[in-house]
Amino acid sequence: MKVQRGSVVIATAGRDCGGHFAVVECMERDGYCLIADGKSRKLESPKKKNLKHVSFTHGFIELDGMTDRQLRRLLSTFGEKAEEDTDGC
């Protein structure tokens, strides 16, 4: 799947495992992307995450003009951190 700004991903490793995030920026050449969820990781200070440690969904969020509050609300529609989603975490 093509990684692009606004793609919705699920973290599969680390302390944020199982959480839904939006890709703020992608550095495919380096193998990393910057992700934010609007709560623990704000749009102004996204988390650098290895592409091997995220799972891509078919979701997409348009991030232009987005606030952290709006991002949290949209990501909540993709699901909260659930026990069944975090089996490998």
Image (cartoon, grey):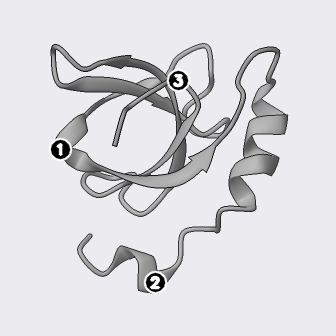
Q: Residue 81: x and y, percent? A: 54, 69
Local packing at callout 3 (Cα closer than 10 Å; few below 14, some 14-19, many 20+) is: some
Left or right relative to 24: residue 10? left
Local packing at callout 1 (Cα closer than 10 Å; few below 14, some 14-19, many 20+) is: few
Q: Residue 64: x and y, percent? A: 75, 16
Q: Nearer the viewer, residue 85 or 1?
A: 1
What residue appears at the point 81 percent right and 49 percent down from the top-left corner? 73
* Dot placed on the residue nearer the N-terminal end, 1 or 2: 1
Q: Residue 39: x and y, percent? A: 66, 40
* Dot placed on the residue nearer the N-terminal end, 2 or 3: 3
Residue holding disc 1: 52
Q: Secondary structure at mark 3?
A: loop
Residue holding disc 2: 83
What residue appears at the point 73 percent right and 59 percent down from the top-left corner? 76
* Dot placed on the residue nearer the N-terminal end, 1 or 3: 3
Q: Is residue 85 above or below residue 31?
A: below
Cα distance, mark 1 to mark 2? 21 Å
Q: Residue 77: x and y, percent? A: 75, 62
Say which quarter of the image contains residue 78. bottom right
What residue appears at the point 60 percent right and 40 percent down from the top-left corner? 37
Residue holding disc 3: 5
Q: Nearer the viewer, residue 28 or 45?
A: 28
Q: Is residue 29 above or below residue 87?
A: above
Cα distance, mark 2 to mark 3? 27 Å
Q: Please tell me the numbered disc located at residue 31.
A: none
Tag 1: amino acid: Lys
